Image: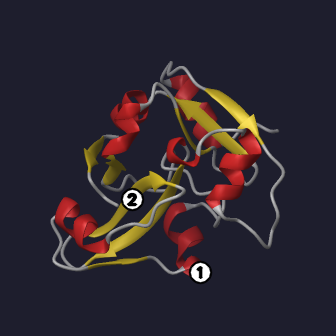
Amino acid sequence: MNKTNAMRLLEQANISFRTAEYEYDENDLNGMHAAEGIGMPPEQVFKTLVARGDKNGFCVFCIPVCCELDLKKAAKASGDKKIELLHVKDLLPTTGYIRGGCSPIGMKKKFPTYLEETAQLYDEIGVSAGARGCQILLAPDALAEFVEADYYDLT
């Protein structure tokens, strides 16, 4: 696997991480498949969702691949009244990433980021490395500090 921008940014910041690759199917970009592919429990592998709030604009949510984002909890966390997930066609122009390879690390712009509080239960979590078929595994606090994320109950 080629080094992704997310990997380069973590290296520049001297943040310890490792990577795990898996076979992906263009027609099945479900995060559960990623967790299975790298042999980690789905509660420990996080998907990156981008949303737009009615007051504060774009924001990023990282939640376990086995869970659904609770939009009311997400809106409360971000200080919005209402929030909706970004349409897939808007993902690349907004973040620089494609569906199935969206990382909370190294988006085009720095958006407020919220991390599901259960991440704190683990020594290591997985997030997309910024390319399909590759995960970055790192300490949740290291991720939270790097992307300036706060922990919230989001699911």
Vertical side of 124 occupied by 51: above or below: below
Look at mark 1 in the image and give the residue it sits on: 89
Q: How far apart are marks 2 and 1 (CA)?
A: 16 Å
- Three-letter amino acid code at the position of disc 2: Val
SS label for mark 1: helix
Which of the marked residues, 2 or 1, is nearer the chain's N terminus? 2
| Residue 102 placement, left or right of 144 | right
Q: Provide residue 40's location: percent of width, then percent of height.
A: 64, 39
| 10 Å crowding of disc 2: few (<14), some (14-19), many (20+) | many
The residue shown at (82%, 38%) is 1
The residue shown at (60%, 60%) is 97
Query: Which quadrant holds the C terminus?
Result: bottom left
- Three-letter amino acid code at the position of disc 1: Lys
Look at mark 2 in the image and give the residue it sits on: 60
Vertical side of 94 occupied by 106: above or below: above
Q: Which of 98 and 5 is in front in this view?
A: 98
| 10 Å crowding of disc 1: few (<14), some (14-19), many (20+) | few
Q: Provide residue 46's location: percent of width, then percent of height.
A: 51, 49
